[in-house]
Amino acid sequence: MSTAEIVSRAQQLFEDLNFTYAREWKAAAPGRKVVGFMPVYVPREMIWAAGALPLGIFGGGDELEVIHGDAYYQSYICRIPRSTIELGVSNRLDFVDGMLFPFVCDVIRNLSGIWKIMFPNVYSKFFDTPQNYQSSIGGNYYVQELHELREGLEKMAGRKITDDDLRRSIADYNENRKAVREVYDFRIEQPWKAPAWEVYLLMRAGMVLPPDEHTKMLRDYVAAARDEDRPIRDNCRIVVTGSFCEQPPLNLVKSIEMAGCYVVDDDYMLVNRWLMTDVPTEGDPLVNLSEAFIKHSVETACKYVDKEEVKGQFLVESVRRSKAEGVIFAAPSFCDPALLDRPMLQHRLTENNIPFIAFKYAENSGQMQPIREQAGTFADSIKLWSEQQ
Amino acid sequence: MSAKETVKEPSMLKQKEMIARNYDAITSAKETGRKVSSTFVPGNLNELVMSFGILNNLPEINAIQNGMRKASGPMIMDAEKRGHSEDVCTYVKADIGMMARGNIAPNGKPMPDPDVLLLSYTGCFTFMKWFELLREEYKCPTLMLHVPYEGDGHMTKNMVDYVVKQLKEVIIPGLEEVSGVKFDIDRLREYMRNSAKAEDDLVWVLETGKLKPSPIDAYFGGVYYIGPMFTAFRGTEDAVEYYKLLRKEIQYRVDNKLGPITPDGEMKDQKYRLVVEGPPNWTHFREFWKMFYDEGAVVVASTYTKVGGTYDQGFRHDETRPLESLAEYCLSCYTNRNLPDRIGMMERYINEYEADGLLTNSIKSCNSFSAGQLLMMREIERRTGKPGAFIETDLVDPRYFSAANVKNRLESYFQMIDQKRKGAKSAA
Ligand code: SF4
Ligand code: SF4
């Protein structure tokens, strides 16, 4: 298969706001369930181990007409909760058996309560993750939370989740994370062969496909992309950060690249990469998931960083690893985590002489011209700067 | 209104004196050698902080003070100029702007840098980032106490254990190190005993809102009543005294069927009884309040007065199990409760306080309170059959207080209540 064919499949999945794939998956065998989850992170291993498909709900994008959702939110709240409600009230999620709302911010936290009121027959849960990163404190707490989640999912699915189910599921996701890393590594190596919007769609496909199928898609893509000739452009290399929850419209992802920036790292759909190492398949699976979370998860704005000197180093490291020349802060309007975090990250970049720009977007932003201009000027200034070195 | 000059009851004078004394203690900490912590109102561990002899400085309260003195606007703009987004909580920006202007306390003296940031993460995401931002400036020890959210509407053993463990292994050792004082559980118990006494009296006062006429205004007046309880005084003898005084004063009003005291004197005519959700606006506090009492609207219950503890729901600090009790205190603060729970509370207020409806003051930059308020209002309207109204302001950013809009909204709301009553009468 060519990259074009693979990307076209991913795009179809992305554009389908009726989630036909997930519906069909559920209908294909008796007893199958679907559990929706919101950004940023839930342990999908648990859902998959229950014989259920984890379905990432990342808002409605720029194609969904929000008719009812606006009646639930004031104008000064971001877009994703209203488009998610729209998906709910327009019955696009009527096949979803459970919904998980992770620790991200107070908007998603409160949406968990709204869901309980509006959809009382759906298993819905605010899924808390620890902000204390010691195994004996936050780790223990998290193991118990996982137990609770397991019980909740068992009840929803009407079946037990055994340790072996979990181990198998962990193995599937280990493989998936490996494939995700391969795509990102490949893009760092040859960004002209893996345009940002294509990688975006591939990663987004992981929000609806079962892990094994998604893994295959990613590997097929890398294999095909390696063999394809694509022109190398005189682009600069940048990292995009701040887009971990409400997603930018696809056009925005494209615009950044068209303005002269190769995106060599990003934080879109961070759930794919949240755990940075394999989760051991031996031993107690819940302890393993917890330890991976506590010790080997990414730094992002919805996590507390307990040491000042470490704060923001993750981003600096990402710039170094991906050989980027600058950072674009692209955050949803009214996004507390991204916008409160931003000044601290910017200070760290300044200390490290890494240039950056910042803008805000909404998932339904239509006007790309200003962003394209801003990114274009940024790219030019980076090139100019590197020529002078 | 009977008197034009502001009436100051003894409890108000006492509170004023307590606040002044605390600011003096904070601004002279360098000379006296006392340590200063910064912490938040929800999940405020004042008894614990005091048991180490540490002074408690609350940035939210400083922001409120600056808001009320109309000093917060330029501070917020300063912070925005320094790269803080216009979209985020204005308390944070007022605090950062205040810092940039020398951190001057209301007594005119500069505040010392905190010796410790006690990040009691209770009910609000912004807290976490706020103290990461301050830590960057002050480079001082920062102690994070993560209080899980009651997502399913109740606290679990796991949540309590987690908080207790953090208290034992992170917070207490951290405060010992900062203060050089060994943890003394008996001292903590003593303060907690005081807290419970004061809490009894506060609840008694808040519940007089059920009477007709209500002797209190549970929102505008309420912010004064909760002052000592929510800040640096809970657990002190002073707070016990304050609440005794307050109770006596309110008892007097009850006995004489007097309405609440407003800045313009006693409120006589109580035409509308409201429950209010959301924090007040501080930059136009008096003007805002006046819009209510001028129309004969008294607030009989509010959720804002439960932000620093939901004592009226039965919680009391319990000296017999101090750490568990502190954990339960944090877990049960209003904004740490899930939406169905918050709705249930307000529904009960409407019924038990015989209110005419729910008014929501939605705060532009506070997602913790605001996200979901429209649904909450509609749900309460549905359950109680009483009309709701929605106004939008901000806490300390004067740019978002439009007096004309708020007044219009309130007037139409009162008309709506009148019509509802007429309708009910004619149906009867
Ligand atoms: S976009 Fe930001 S503020 Fe909105 S729900 Fe996501 S994390 Fe929260
Ligand atoms: S977001 Fe709301 S609860 Fe949080 S600090 Fe700001 S005003 Fe307080």
Image (spheres, helix red, strand yellow):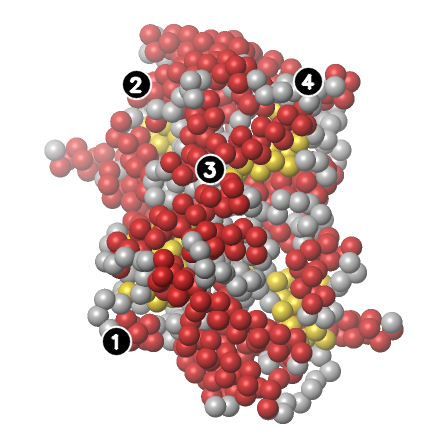
Query: Could you say which quadrant of the image residue A212 lies in?
Result: bottom left
**Element type where label 4 sits in the image:** helix
Mark 3 and mark 4 on one chain:
yes
Residue A28, label in figure: 1
**Element type where label 1 sits in the image:** loop
Earlier-in-chain disc, 2 versus 3: 3
Q: Depth check: B158 or A88 in front?
A: B158
Q: Residue at x 40, y 50 (%)?
A: A146
Query: Could you say which quadrant of the image residue B307 lies in?
Result: top left
Q: Position of residue B81 (x, y in %)?
A: 71, 49
Which residue, given by chain and number where applicable, does mark 3 sit on?
B162
Q: Residue at x 49, y 21 (%)?
A: B229
Q: Nearer the viewer, mark 2 or mark 3?
A: 3
Q: Position of residue A307 (x, y in %)?
A: 66, 45
Q: Nearer the viewer, mark 4 or mark 2?
A: 4
Which residue, given by chain and number where applicable, does mark 4 sit on?
B25
Earlier-in-chain disc, 3 versus 4: 4
Q: Amino acid at mark 1?
A: Ala
Q: Amino acid at mark 2?
A: Leu
Which residue, given by chain and number where applicable, does mark 2 sit on?
B211
